[in-house]
Amino acid sequence: MKIKVYNQEGKEAGTADLPDGVFGLKWNADLVHQVVTGQAANLRRGTAHAKGRSEVRGGGRKPWRQKGTGRARHGSIRSPIWIGGGVTHGPLKEKSYHKKINKKMAKKALFTALSAKARDNEIVILEDLKFSEAKTRYAAEIFRNLSQVDALKDIVKAKTLLAFPEKSHDLKRAFRNLPRVGMDEARNLNAHEVLQYRYILMSKAVLGIFKQ
């Protein structure tokens, strides 16, 4: 698949070949749904916790004697039926939401999501991505330049994921203050992350990583 390549001024700078094994797959809704829901579940921390009657403070003494008062018998003011008592069958922090995802499934789901983006013209390739200084104004200028292209006129307003070929503190520093822009290394991308954004912006160097 051929795709246009742009420079940082928003001008066409040639074309690039998108590998069919990464950007030419058919849509597989069942696979993508299974992987994405699993990846979303693995992001859950599971910290919700309700104290049971054995964890609530106080209640060590019997409220009143067993017989002779005319009132119902009780053994502790921290019983679940008392206000301020423990919780019955509440959430526990020991619960794990982890779901196993096979590596081949995760990889194919990622490539399927990227293929869908490519068909919708939502993959944006830059010839190169570098600045003389790590300044936000330079990063914002790239989006303004790309918005002059008819097919990318709403890239300034849409959510965009920037895929780096490798870790770069300067690029992260330049792009981190832009709203609706996410960043990650290409080797760390997954289907769940890709589908959170409309556009995927990357340099030509990233295409070599997907071929590996």
Image (tube, rainbow, N blue to C red):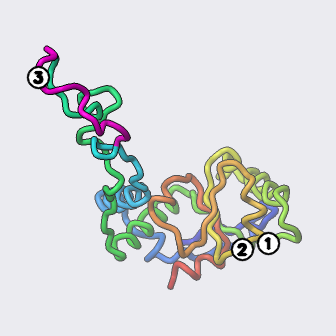
Where residue 75 appears, x then y in whole percent? 20, 33
Q: Amino acid at mark 2?
A: Ser
- Left-right relation of 38 to 178: left
Q: Secondary structure at mark 1?
A: loop
Q: Is residue 117 visible?
A: yes
**N-terminal of the two: label 3 or label 1?**
3
Q: Which residue is tagged 1?
A: 130
Q: Residue 28: tell me if it is visible.
A: no
Q: Residues within 10 Å of mark 1 (few under 14, many from 20)?
A: few
Kindly identify the amino acid type of the residue bearing the numbered disc 3.
Answer: Lys
- Between 39 and 52, the residue placed more toward the observer is 52
Q: CA distance from mark 1 to mark 2?
A: 10 Å
What's the residue type where badge 1 is placed? Lys
Residue holding disc 3? 67
- For numbered disc 2, what is the local secondary structure? loop
Nearer the camera: disc 1 or disc 2: 2
Query: Which residue does the numbered mark 2 point to in the structure image?
Result: 168
Is 119 magenta? The answer is: no
Q: Residue at 66% of width from left, 54% of height from top?
A: 181
The residue range painted magenta reads 56-70
Instruction: Tell whether 42 sits left or right of 139.
Output: left
User: Which comes before the other along the chain, label 3 or label 2?
Assistant: 3
Q: Nearer the viewer, mark 3 or mark 1?
A: 3
User: Is 192 in front, or is 92?
Assistant: 92
Residue in the image at 34% along x and 71% along y: 105
Q: Earlier in the sequence, mark 1 or mark 2?
A: 1
Residue at 32% in and 59% down: 96
Chief secondary structure of the magenta span?
loop
